[in-house]
Amino acid sequence: MPVEPLSLSILSRDEVCKLLRQVAIHATTKTVPHLVSMSDPPDGPPREVENHAGRTLALIFYDTDEGDRDFKAPTRNDVAQIIEFAKDIQPGEHTVCHCNAGISRSSAAALTIIASKLERTPEGAQQALEELMRVKDVIHPNRTMVKYADELLGFEGSLWKAYAAIYGGGDLLWFLK
């Protein structure tokens, strides 16, 4: 359990661009020490993200559960990079997670960061989802990313079960294909 709650924002592409432009103008009063950016392959990260002076993790994949030649889905490695990035985030330091709409990939990244700081128990998993819902109410974390976070963080299914109880998990067999 964190000593102090994490400070997180879940934003859309447009919202993060506006925020980062404001940060650049008012550098003395506003900062974004940590930024996780998820963009679609043809777009790549926005220019404002590329110019961000804080720590940035830029990932490129579509908001999809199953990838193919045309649609790159999030991978285990993408989620592992979020977990590694989260290790240097201290309580009280602000972290922004963004994707195109600010609903699915960004909320899954935020959940991964929150869960990485908690005990790997059913109670810790439930707490992670509760903390996530306090950050933003209109979200639906990408299920592939949540499944990978559950596995990589060692929640042994409890993070997935907490997620499924709120968002509906469906049949896990899709993941085993």
Image (tube, rainbow, N blue to C red):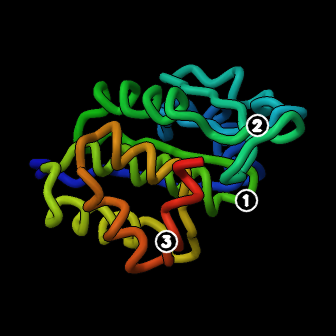
From the top left corner, tell me how far across and down residue 29 is, in percent. Answer: 48, 39
How far apart marks 2 and 1 lie (CA) works out to: 17 Å
On screen, residue 162 versus residue 54, left or right, reads left
Q: How would you rate the neighbour count of disc 3 (Cα within 10 Å): few for under 14, some for 14-19, many for 20 or more? A: some
Q: Is 65 displayed left or right of 172 in the figure?
A: right
| Count of all numbered marks drawn on residues in the image | 3
Front residue of 91/109: it is: 109
Q: Nearer the viewer, mark 3 or mark 1?
A: 3
Under mark 2, the amino acid is Lys
Identify the secondary structure beneath mark 1: loop
- In this view, 51 is above or below 75: above
* Residue matched to label 3: 169
Name the residue nearer the viewer: 138 or 82: 82
Where, by quadrant of the figure, is residue 70 drawn? top right
Q: Indicate which disc, 2 or 1, sits on the residue closer to the N terminus.
A: 2
Q: Quadrant of residue 83?
A: top left
Q: Is residue 48 left or right of residue 153?
A: right
Image position, residue 104 (x, y; %): 61, 59
Residue 101: image tag:
1
Tell me what residue is drawn at x 30 percent, y 71 percent: 130
SS at badge 3: loop
Instruction: Report the Cα–Cα distance between label 3 and label 1.
Output: 21 Å
- Please report the residue visible at 42 percent of the width from the left and 79 percent of the height from the top: 166
Q: Which residue is mark 2?
A: 72
